[in-house]
Amino acid sequence: MSEKSKLIQGRTGPWEIVLGLEIHAQVASNSKLFSGAAVGFGAGPNEQVALVDAAMPGMLPVINRHCVEQAVRAGLGLNAQINLWSRFDRKNYFYPDLPQGYQISQFKDPIVGEGIVEVERDDGTTFIVGVERLHLEQDAGKSIHDLDPNFTYVDLNRAGTALMEIVSKPDMRSSDEAASYVKKIRTILRYLGACDGDMEKGNLRADVNVSVRRPGAELGTRCEIKNVNSYRYIQQAIEYEARRQIEILEDGGSIHQETRLFDPTKIETRSMRSKEEAHDYRYFPDPDLLPLVLDPAWVQSIKDSLPELPDPKRKRFESQYGLSHYDAGVLVADQARAAFYEQAAAGRDAKLVANWTVNNLLGRLAENGGDIENSPIPPEDIAGLVKLIEDGVISSKIAKEVFDHMWAGEGTPAQVVEKFGLVQITDTGAIEASIDKIMAANPDKVEAAKERPQALGWFVGQVMRDTGGKANPAAVNEILKAKLGL
Amino acid sequence: MAIDAATVRKVARLARIREPEERLEPLAQELNTIISWIEQLEEVDTDGVEPMTSVVAVALPLRDDVVTEGGDTSRILSNAPKSADGFFIVPKVVE
């Protein structure tokens, strides 16, 4: 995407959007950040609450080693600096789903410092987003406002669950770039196993900072849109908010720095006035917690245990299997996809396997709202299908038919070919008979083909039709050329 | 640094402490006395001294990621002024 096309045209000239994101990713763990209560979805109200989470007097927080490790893993995956000394602060505000009256977070000395993420746009070009920091903090509980007209119901099951907040630099310039960045962060975290990335359950969500400016001018005043939990909502919220700010500025007004809420049904953002005063968080070091000190040897051992991450994997797929940048990108976007592909490609024509996996299998799965884990076809059957093509048993055209039967659960590729009689005709006698028949019926085309060899294609098409697509195209070509004297 | 009645009002509100209007001015004076006492500490040269984060020189202990608590809804709710169906019930919070 060129620099120019990202600009928004206002009534008084072009504007540039500047975006920074705070991604909240729930750490995949059994228990909470500072208590032994379970983390999980679907339990009854207040069933997963320890006395610490309910802020009972005298209770002390004890940090979860696994959560610390996941934050370090995430930091390493974001090519970021790991701070061997960090500490926790109290972020003070009052809300019914925050029984402590403060959230334990990391303000001044986070566990992870600056990092770098390379992000692919949809058109295949890349851009760099700087990571400002990653810190550990507690999630709040859940307030339910619609159970009673006069009261709010509070469930503390989520209170105290470990979150990683990943703060980006204001390095994105369009809603597409913001969505691509979130996708990349999600992919990396899922590879690392640090977060399951389930956006529907709110396990990965983003606060989006939006400002606009004239191209090349100083940064404008930003507004923060809270808790947006899908790629589409992120894009819609940004588009709406940028337009809103431009309207105000073009009318000679100014932007107030404020927190806003995205309403997905109305596709608009609106001011969250209640948060305005709460913005004075009065951070101070949490006296209940000592500084978090990491052993460099432990950090090194975490580094040594990291899986192959999406960027290196993509480069390897391109060099080892000769895949296009696009196909490699699609396959590494998800670890399960990449594993499926590598299993199917072993010993086979790797590019052909990529074609069948990306265009046919993933395409078909996407049409049905699924991904590789929902595939009715196992990797060895994709390999089997490609082997049948390689061995000349079936043509690529027939392979599509075989694939449909495989998708319908009608057996392995070999079984399908057998059952439906889809074996390619390589018997030259049968092909010759078909060619003779067509040549006899179309003497004018025979003459034309002798004049213009390009017209051969018409005959190939006729033979394929005559044989129900089962004739081996290479054999058809060869025999046709001989008979036409080309 | 001087604290006025408006600042006291704001701080009290942030801490959810209700103070009657006539208490704000006396409180501001009390707080100013405390702050001026603390300001004396600024006379000490602390260049190159790391801020103290704890009085004990030990690192944070870490625990294993195992579930040891929970499933105790009635005890969690036992101090709540109002509860039903496993939920805490509080005055309506309108967003």
Image (tube, grey):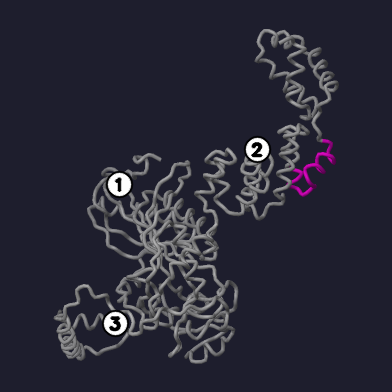
Tell me which label, 1 or 2, sits earlier in the chain.
1
Picture mark count: 3
Q: CA distance from mark 1 to mark 2?
A: 45 Å
Q: Residue at x 76, y 31 (%)?
A: A392
Mark 1, other Cα within 10 Å: few <14 / some 14–19 / many ≥20:
many
Magenta stretch, main secondary structure class = helix
Q: Is there one chain holding both mark 1 and mark 2?
A: yes
Mark 2, other Cα within 10 Å: few <14 / some 14–19 / many ≥20:
some
**Would residue B73 be found to the left or right of residue B46 on screen?**
right
Residue B83 badge: none
Label 2 is placed on what type of residue? Leu
Q: Is residue A445 magenta?
A: no
Q: Chain of mark 3?
A: B
**Closer to the camera in the image, A53 or A302:** A302
Q: CA distance from mark 3 to mark 2?
A: 67 Å
Q: Give the quarter of the figure containing the N terminus of chain A.
A: top left
Q: Is residue A409 magenta?
A: yes
Instruction: State which mark lies toward you, 1 or 2.
Output: 2
Q: Position of residue A470 (x, y in %)?
A: 78, 30
Q: Are marks 1 and 3 in contact (CB under 8 Å)?
A: no
Residue A352 badge: 2
Q: Secondary structure at mark 2?
A: helix
**Would residue B86 be found to the left or right of residue B46 on screen?**
right
Q: Position of residue A413 (x, y in %)?
A: 77, 43
Q: Residue at x 67, y 12 (%)?
A: A453
Q: Which residues are magenta?
A: A404-421
In the rendered image, which residue does mark 1 sit on?
A15
Q: Position of residue A465 (x, y in %)?
A: 76, 26
Q: Is residue A179 above or below residue B33?
A: above
Residue A449: tell me if it is visible.
yes
Label 3 is placed on what type of residue? Arg
